[in-house]
Image (spheres, rainbow, N blue to C red):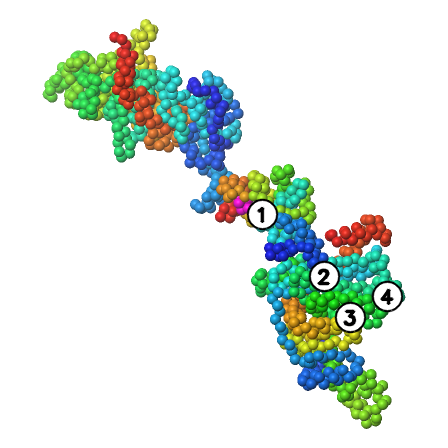
Amino acid sequence: MAKSKGDGATAKTRGEAIGVITKGSLVEGLEMKLDSAQNVEDMKAGKFVVIEGDKNDFFSMVTDMRLDAKNQEVLLHPPGREDDILRKVLAGTSTYNIVSLRPMLMMPKGAVDDDGPRPVKAIPSHFSEVQEAMEHDVAKIFGKEGDPEGRYFSIGNPLDMDTQVCLDMIRFAERSNGIFGKTGTGKSFLTRLALCGLIHYDKAVNLIFDMHNEYGFKAMKENGSSSTFVKGLKQLFGERVAIFSLDPQSTRARGVQADHEVYISYDQITVEDIAPLQDELRLNPTAVESAYLVYAIYKERWLRTLLALEGPDVEEFAREIGAHAGSLVALHRKLKRLENFPFMVSKVTDGDVVDRIMEYLDKGINVVLEFGQQTSMLCYLLVANIIARRIHEMYVKKSERFYATQRTEDQPRQLMITIEEAHKFLNPTAAKQTIFGTIAREMRKYYVSLLVVDQRPSSIDDEVLSQIGTRITALLNDEKDIQAVLTGVSGTEGLRSVLASLDSKQQALILGHAVPMPVVVKTRDYDTQFYKDMGCLDDLPEAERKAKIDKGTVALYGDN
Amino acid sequence: MLDLYAVKTQIDDMVVDERRVQEDFRAKLELALAEYRRWEPEWQTLATKINKSRTSWLLPGMADGLGGGVERPERPAEISIAATDGSQIFPDRHEVSSCFLINIGYILLHYGTGEKPLMSSKPTLYYREEEIFEEWGGRRMFVNRDLVGFKRSLMEFTELADLALAAKAEGHPVVALSDGTLILWNLEGKPQDFKESYLQTTLEAMDSLRDARIPVAGYISQPGSQELINALKLGLCPLEVADCDRCPWQAENQLGFNEDEIGAIQDDLWRGHGLPCSPLEGLNDAVLVSHVLSPGQRTPLYLSTSKILNEYGSHRIYYFYLDVGAEIGRVEIPEWVATDPELLELVHACMCDQADKGQGYPVALAEAHERAVVRGADRDTFYRFLRDTFVKNNIQTSISTKSFKKRYVGI
Amino acid sequence: MTRVENVKERKPSPLSRFMPDEMAKRDGAGAERTYVGEVVESSTTELIAEARELHGGPSFGEFIRIEADLPVLGIIFNVFTHSIEPNRRPTAYGKTEEELRLEQPQIFELLRTEFQALIIGYLDGGAPVQILPPQPARIHSFVHLCTDEEVRAFTGNDDYLRRILNTSKVPTDELLIAVLRHTLRAHEHSRDYLVRMGKELSRLMGDDYDRLSSVIRRVAN
């Protein structure tokens, strides 16, 4: 799996011994008696340790710790605050600390590179030594940025370690992924990080429904009381990112010229696009049925026709087409709201926006769709649905052609669609109606996957959740949310406590497809160094930058 | 079963008797004190009578009076006291060897300097033929207890002199204390050659002390001597010149008296008065002096008239009584100390001080005794060791004595 | 004391003939000797030694080394001063020691300071061995104080603590505290060392938390 850099590293050192294994089981995890010289406060949940067994090294995560005492007397008459020496003496003798460990991977000793970590099927013997994980241990498991394939993307450091934890970007792009965390824990930051990885290593092209205008250009960095701006994807990747805007005015107000303004004609909206809006529009099921009746007669012009009617005519219209008058009136009244959206036009002049998006995507240009001031959930749901559905249709066709021809040049680019507030699309009801539910369930059959960003994973349909390959989770408090995130992961007992004890900033638990084992990271800084690593050229001298851009453009668009 | 009633009557009787004895004694003492006071201003008259009279008892020579106390002088801040004492294991014919042992204890206490005192003892084993047989007065004799005692006393004194001299040589001002009398009256009646030899050794030691100007004093605790009482008895004698051999109050001496005289004397006797001198019978000097002196005071000097002193040459012995608080002690000094006021004062002061420190008995002498003493248990150990060593070396009576001696010393 | 020594260094002394043998000897060649005592009773597990000077014994809990082919190591668990004459007891004089030294010098000659040591091991070729020596220290051999270095070498591990705890001779805890304080000084008051020994004690004392905390507290302050 991961290739360790230089064989000498393994032989060189072992981490500091921090304790020995005293009991445990494969199912429930292991217990370590903490060495008395160690401070229990250093044993943070999520810390990464190596248990040196007789035949295997077990890579494990700290999941829990417990204070214990041999003698009740000590607890009844604890040493005073000033009895520093006595406290130290008691530490590890009369009073001691038990740390719960969850073995995540095991690796046979002296294994060669290819014979990498495997799932844990054994446990180490009594008194096996537990060591702090070293950089080479981590690298052995998570790989290291800078491999020739461009496979590994560093997302941060393990707790209290100064080494990289890498996502396997190929595996990451293969499946749908989730980024979870309660409000204010840095979901968008994590998302931006993941997107940067995908774009930088070119493992997938992205379509991002940027509800809060956080990804394209400049974004606020939440930094306590003061806020600073960080670079957006456009700034980092230039030509490889295009910004589409539903609200060009707003986009301009933020100092960006959108690459494309988005307008949607009524003819582009299908009943399937309306159906998932039931909640937002407070439609009843008969209203949707009525819509189908209208559609049956007027086909794609159904919405235009319906909206053209005025109040009293609707009832008559209902009678004409044999629909229930009451429902149709309600449907008509609710859908009237769509006319308020500035991007809704009766006829698009500048070509179909979805075609333009597809054009970009085909070229490998990532598309950020900004919503500007149109931050209503209704708008977001509607637009995301309409566009995603049509993009998906195109991908299905492309994929089928590829399966037919089996020519490499016909192979579609892997597409990842980023959606926020994902539970609105993927709750058990919506998941059956929206295109996103379909995408999530189809897996990668049609080269489309989702990057789901959400704060309430428990609201997402279980079936969808189970299809999510990699989960990057910031702090969650709600028991149901925690449960949801861990759905389909073995040995969740330990991870549960880890998850609940994450810092609210810059810490995340990563588990799933793109990492060999669950790991808590302190996320990578999104700073100048990162920009440079991502190939951002802003800081280079003018001429040099231009040269590089030209070169990049040629590479991107070919010679035509 | 004890008949307490019967005992009670007897105790009552005893108390009556005891009281009578005490009353009798008090009367005697009062008489003695009265006599003492009477003669005090006229001591020269008494002295003259003493010189002229011939008594059966020892009389004191008086040089500077009969009574009156001399106050305790101050002791010099820095002074060293040398003292010796001795004891012995007497030869025992029943033991494997007829050897004997003399153990001398040495004490040299330095006052006022903080200097470490010398406190030691040295045993000497006598076992050679010439050591256990001596020839005196033409008679070869096995060394008996008597002789060992003399030998020990002599060693005590010569060792004391040596110790004091060595201390003086090291720059210590020193006073030498001897336990007991300096008057070797018990040499009387010994073979002439023995007596001479003994005396000569003693006097040579005296000479060296005198030459080094080291005062030497003998201390007698609880002295039983009655010389002062004897002088007062002489004072009671109605005769102008007493001659006890011809005491008219003795029946056998009444031949030369006329009827009247004898009648008066016998009348006295009949009335229970006994001899004129007998009212003071039973008293001793210490009792008398204890009612005269206060603590620290000494009596005037008296000259001992012991016959042996005729052979002491310039070392004739003077003495005084000293109230050391706990008791009346008798201090004996040679003439060259008695006549040297500085040395005399030094002896007086040191004696008082020593007695103070020793709770009534001069501490140096007490310690010397502790060093010297050979207790019963020590004696038993000595003989057991002796026997063991003999057996171990397979010796009957003739011994490779050198190694034997060595091993003993090194325990 | 020193004053006495100074005076006695004069030689040859006319008084030497009267001195006790050992005193005369000490007067000469022994002047530079550094020993603190001489063994007068000895067994495998403990010994009694007479201090060279009155009140000059080692301190309670101190480490001593007894000269021998395999030097024996011990710790002082009792120091006592007593009259050398069984039938003479010291009595109160109501004077200061200085006054007594000037005016009652003999009493100090009648007192001896002796000390008892618990044998805790020996040196084999200079290396500490935490086992009772094969042969006890010999009578009359000299007793020296251990250097800090020797103490450090011997107390690197906890075996000596076990030896102390296993003795029933003395108030064990008091001895333990005294010894640890000496040891700690040799280890330059290292807190780490104290903590390490404390942990061993905790183990050796089993569940007796009260005892442990009392010992540690008193060693540490």
Q: Residues within 10 Å of mark 2 (few under 14, many from 20)?
A: many
- Secondary element under disc 3, as helix, strand or loop, is loop
Q: Nearer the viewer, mark 2 or mark 1?
A: 2
Distance between the alpha carbons at the discs numbered 4 and 1: 64 Å
Q: Which residue is mark 4?
A: B136
Q: From the top left corner, tell me how far across and down residue B197 is, in percent.
A: 81, 66
User: What is the three-letter code of the residue carrying label 4?
Assistant: Trp
User: What is the three-letter code of the residue carrying label 1?
Assistant: Glu
Q: Residue furthest front?
A: B211
Q: Which residue is mark 3?
A: B184
Q: Which residue is mark 1?
A: C62
Distance between the alpha carbons at the discs numbered 3 and 4: 18 Å
Q: Residue at x 70, y 58 (%)?
A: C14
Q: Please tell me which residue lies in front, B3 or C108.
A: C108
From which residue to which does the magenta span run?
A: C180-185
Q: From the top left corner, tell me how far across and down residue C111 is, in percent.
A: 64, 58
State which chain disc 2 sits on.
Answer: B
For residue B139, what is the image quadrant?
A: bottom right
Would you place residue B158 above or below residue A365 in this image? below
The first of marks 2 and 3 along the sequence is 2
State which chain disc 1 sits on.
Answer: C
Q: Is residue A262 shown left or right of residue A110?
A: left
